[in-house]
Image: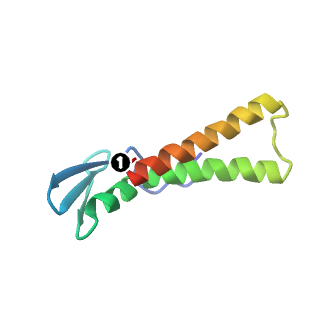
Amino acid sequence: MITNQTHTPSPWHTDRKDEGKVIIDLPGDGAILILGYNTEANARLIAAAPDLLAALEFCHTRLFNYQAGMDEIRDPEITRQLNEVAIVAARVAIAKAKGS
């Protein structure tokens, strides 16, 4: 669903190294070091960024198609299921970002 992706693909994970420093591990050899205040919360938010982007894109597509009357799927049950997937994707991404 992500088009023209230029960021490192997910999954990104936080790995606490010591007090005041958090590492975000990226696939491959990449990593981001987070320093300063609220490091764990900031690291969770950054690590959740690919999931948040994917969920937002999926929700946007669902809402746009619904509003424009362009929903290719005319079966109400399939439409309901796709909408539920969008809601769950958003909830999971938000929970990852918040650490809950």
In-image side of 79 versus 34 (left or right): right
Q: Amino acid at mark 1?
A: Trp
Q: What's the colour scheme?
A: rainbow
Q: Tell me which residue sits at (76%, 35%) in the image.
A: 79
In-image side of 81 versus 29 (left or right): right
Residue 2 in sight from this viewpoint: no
Instruction: Give the crowd class for mark 1: few <14, some 14-19, many >=20 residues within 10 Å.
Output: many
Disc 1: which residue: 12
Q: Tell me which residue sits at (81%, 38%) in the image.
A: 72
Which residue is farthest front? 100
Residue 36 in sight from this viewpoint: yes
Count of labels in the image: 1
**Residue closest to the eye, 84 or 4:** 84
Looking at the picture, does residue 36 appear above or below residue 93?
Answer: below
**Under tag 1, what secondary structure?**
loop
Q: Position of residue 94 (x, y in %)?
A: 48, 51
For the N terminus, the image quarter is: top right
Q: Position of residue 56 (x, y in %)?
A: 59, 53
Looking at the picture, does residue 53 appear above or below residue 27?
Answer: below
Q: Position of residue 44 (x, y in %)?
A: 35, 54
Which residue is farthest bottom? 36
In-image side of 35 versus 93 (left or right): left
Q: Tell me which residue sits at (71%, 47%) in the image.
A: 62
In-image side of 24 versus 71 (left or right): left
Q: Position of residue 36 (x, y in %)?
A: 23, 70
Q: Tell me which residue sits at (63%, 47%) in the image.
A: 58
